[in-house]
């Protein structure tokens, strides 16, 4: 079960691309949600392509794709998934401008997320049935960031999962989620509270304070600014800093796995090689020629 969950969480993200989520249904209609490249919800609708309103539904999908420059279409794999996939292929035939690539996405746990307190906080004015479509779109963009919002057991991690000790299963699955989050790292300027909570050294209160600080002061420019966050002391900083990434910040090292404690070592290497950081980062042939003992001190 742990291995199955690990594979689900570590699935390759589609990245920063505008995505349409289709939560299939027959009688109740197909729920549509469009999120922009950052995952922000920009449009929702409900269409009924399987109950004699296919033409109207096709026009709605085509209009949304064109308006929001949709690049990917995530189709849930539940009831009426195949019919919805065929409908989307028909839309592409009718409207050649609709070029977004379709991907079938597991919708396991989407309904649990829809009815959760977290979804209600995120989308207080959105109908519960439409929240599932948002989750489907986002889990194609970044599976890890979206799936951490759902109780691991609800994701559906294998047959007979209810026949084993639920306490042991929950403990093991929680550990897998944390391992995955910390292995990948978290973008400090876009991460949600549930994602930050899974980072080593951070409590839920600290995660909420990080998001609150970000909302009030704008994006983090460097890792040292974490020390300005309420209730986040030096010890928590020491534990979490290496897992939090800042892209396009003041220091390129903030986007790497290098811990702030090791920055002086990097500076000594740069001074010795007389190279710019961007030239040295990822340059394995150059780094292989260096002798580690030349740059260590009593701390490293």
Image (cartoon, grey):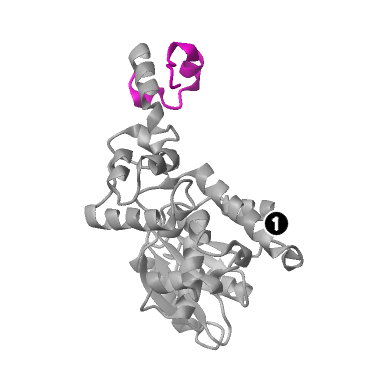
Which residue lies at the image location 49% right of the left edge and 60% below the top edge? 146
Q: How many marks?
A: 1
Give the position of the N terminus as an image quadrant: bottom right
Part of the protein shown in magenta: 275-300
Q: Position of residue 136 (x, y in %)?
A: 51, 66
Near mark 1 (Cα within 10 A), the count class, few <14, some 14-19 or many ≥20, is some
Q: Is residue 94 visible?
A: no
Q: Position of residue 283 (x, y in %)?
A: 46, 23
Nearest the eye: 105 or 299: 299
Q: Secondary structure at mark 1?
A: loop
Q: Quick check: 285 above or below 50?
A: above
Give the position of the C terminus as an image quadrant: top left
Q: Quick check: 116 above or below 233?
A: below
Residue 19 lies in the magenta stretch: no
Q: Is residue 165 visible?
A: yes
Which residue lies at the image location 57% right of the left edge and 87% below the top edge? 27
Q: Which residue is mark 1?
A: 1
Nearest the eye: 154 or 27: 154
The quadrant holding residue 109 is bottom right
Nearest the eye: 215 or 81: 215
Q: Position of residue 223 (x, y in %)?
A: 33, 40
The quadrant holding residue 76 is bottom right
Q: Position of residue 253 (x, y in %)?
A: 37, 32
Q: Is residue 288 left or right of residue 173?
A: left
């Amino acid at each position: 079960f742990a291995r199955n969950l690990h594979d689900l969480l570590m699935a390759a993200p589609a990245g920063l691309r505008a995505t349409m989520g289709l939560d299939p249904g027959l009688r109740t209609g197909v729920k549509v949600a469009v999120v922009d490249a950052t995952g922000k919800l920009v449009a929702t609708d409900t269409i009924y392509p399987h109950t004699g309103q296919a033409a109207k539904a096709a026009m709605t999908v085509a209009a949304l794709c064109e308006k929001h420059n949709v690049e990917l279409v995530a189709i849930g794999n539940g009831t009426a998934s195949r019919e919805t996939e065929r409908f989307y292929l028909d839309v592409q035939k009718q409207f050649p401008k609709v070029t977004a690539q379709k991907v079938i996405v597991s919708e396991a746990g989407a309904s649990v997320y829809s009815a959760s307190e977290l979804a209600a906080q995120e989308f207080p004015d959105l109908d519960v049935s439409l929240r599932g479509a948002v989750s489907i779109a986002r889990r194609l963009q970044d599976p890890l960031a979206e799936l951490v919002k759902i109780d691991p057991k609800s994701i559906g991690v294998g047959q007979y999962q209810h026949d084993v000790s639920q306490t042991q299963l929950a403990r093991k699955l929680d550990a897998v989620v944390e391992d995955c989050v910390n292995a990948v790292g978290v973008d400090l300027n876009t991460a949600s509270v549930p994602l930050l909570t899974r980072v080593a050294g951070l409590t839920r209160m600290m995660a909420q304070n990080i998001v609150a600080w970000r909302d009030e002061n704008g994006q983090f420019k460097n890792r040292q600014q974490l020390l300005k966050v309420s209730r986040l002391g030096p010890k928590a900083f020491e534990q979490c800093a290496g897992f939090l990434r800042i892209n396009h910040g003041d220091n390129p090292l903030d986007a790497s796995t290098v811990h702030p404690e090791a920055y002086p070592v990097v500076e000594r290497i740069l001074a010795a090689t007389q190279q710019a950081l961007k030239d040295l980062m990822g340059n394995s042939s150059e780094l292989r020629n260096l002798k580690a003992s030349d740059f260590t001190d009593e701390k490293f």
